[in-house]
Amino acid sequence: MLTFRNLIPALTAACWLAACGGGGSDPVGGSDPDNGGSGGTPTAVGDPDTETWTALQGYMDVIRTSSKFDECRTDTPQAEPWKCVRGPRTGTALGHAVHDWLAAQFRAIPGITAVQIQSFDLPIFTPLRYGLEVDFGSGLENVDAFPWYYRGLTTLQGVSGPLIDVGDGGLIAQLTTGDLSGKIAVMDISLFLNAEDGQSANQIAQLRAKGAVGLIIGTDAPANDIAVQNYDIADGLRWLPTVIVGPEDAARIRAVEGGTAHVTVAGTYRGGDDSVPQSLVGQYGQSRNTVAVLPGADPDNIIVVGTPLNAWLTAAGERGPGVGMIVYLARYFAERAREDGPLPYTIWFVGTGAHEIYGFGINRFLSCFDPERIVAYVHLGSGLVYKGYTEPLLQDGNPTPTGGMSQTRTLAVSENSILQSISGRAFSDLILQPYFALPPSLFVPGENRGPYAQGIPTIGMNGTNAYFHTLRDDESQIHRPALGPMALAFRETVQGLLDADADAVRSANSIAAVLGAALQDEALYWECAGALQQP
């Protein structure tokens, strides 16, 4: 069977670009009986660029300034910045804060109703102390590092051992390194498929089996940037404590192979993995979906517009545009309904949780509905308007800006003639091109995957650039001239669905449903996170 993991080697060149139950639903704010918006005087909806940018900045303000940030692991953050890195990570207070913020945005829109938060249980990894020290010849020195969540735990004292270079961790490298007992390995990975090396899991497990007690990962991120990595929580807690460093630091560490290193990744794990000693396991943690509804004339046909809210770091270019656009689209279509009367179909807007650990809040949300009610899922994915770069790297290790938008984007549209016609028109603006249009049956990334596998018509875009999952993924990585046109493209996509015959859209999805069925064994967490309040 064609699976996500065995697709990776074949698609590396083309798809570089691509770029468990439990819980419930909690009402959030609002004073009217159906928990709708707070009302007030409607403010006129502005142009797509201004609206999206304003909402994007609100999301970033929460990430940067919220007092709910609870993962600072040093008393000297200026001296040890990587031990106090902010990010709306799944299961954290800051991760919940961005959901609260989006709920407040929805409540403020007249006509938007049934604003609520769907909470769901899932494993959560919480580092309590982490760091890396390396002896470069004059004693142990601190090296900037960030843990690869879920890869393994040490005690609070950490582990020490001699360094050994295992190259890319492949078969030849492992055959030549011999016994790794008590050693700390140094390994390279290459970044593609949204900053996760999908082939590294087996290699890391083999290093552990050969006796390694710690792992230092270097990537091919720019300069000395640390590129934080995703993790699939379906794999449970692993057993080789791992930290990620910048490529320049990785090279320095390799140069002192045989010297001593000290790795600390102490923390807690809340989950139901039977292989984990109960002394390390507490109650499940939680993530959230933030949900709001714009009622339409036909409540039995719904369009779902979604975007993830959680991320490892500030993620301005990765998450910001999608979050800004979902607020804009909710405001725009609510204004349309106020002025012209109810839209043909009901629109559900959902900010999903657990993105970076593949907890797929969208699967948990959509499974609360009879699929026959869903006209389509529209996904506002990662890196929608990233700034573009070209190779080769400059002398300082930084890539060269192109002056335009990143071409490492893919538009995934179900093999559905009506959806393809809608998306072809919506994304025709030259500033949004070129992008890759890969058949979802061959490759469909992120939150598009589950809906596609379940036969739901899907349209979504995802992208990446050189600074994906790094601290330099701030607003400077957004190609601002494309922000408004991209928001308009998604607005026209939703409008195209509103104008289409719902039954015809579903009928046109028959081929996609057959092709997507082959992926159903990978469409995890397809169970309702909790009853949803209907408008």
Image (tube, helix red, strand yellow):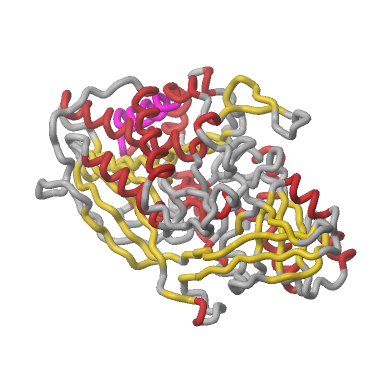
211 left or right of 78 in image: right
| Front residue of this view, candidates 64 and 477 | 64
Write down the quadrant of residue 45 in the picture: top left
Name which residue lies at 14% across and 36% down: 39
Furthest-bottom residue in this view: 278
Write down the quadrant of residue 393 in the picture: top right
- Give residue 170's position: percent from left, percent from top: 80, 58
**Is residue 339 shown in magenta?**
no
Q: Is residue 19 visible?
A: no
Furthest-right residue in this view: 176
348 left or right of 405 in image: left
Quadrant location, the N terminus: bottom right
| Image height of 189 relative to 349, above or below | below
Q: Most prominent secondary structure in the magenta stretch?
A: helix
- Give residue 526's position: percent from left, percent from top: 41, 60
| Front residue of this view, candidates 255 and 27 | 255
- Give residue 168's position: percent from left, percent from top: 79, 54
Write down the quadrant of residue 194 in the picture: top right
**Is residue 491 shown in magenta?**
yes
- Give residue 311's position: percent from left, percent from top: 48, 48
| Image height of 159 relative to 496, above or below | below
Which stretch is magenta?
Answer: 486-502
Name which residue lies at 64% across and 55% down: 5
| Front residue of this view, candidates 209 and 246 | 246
| Image height of 173 relative to 351, above or below | below
| Image height of 294 relative to 340, above or below | below
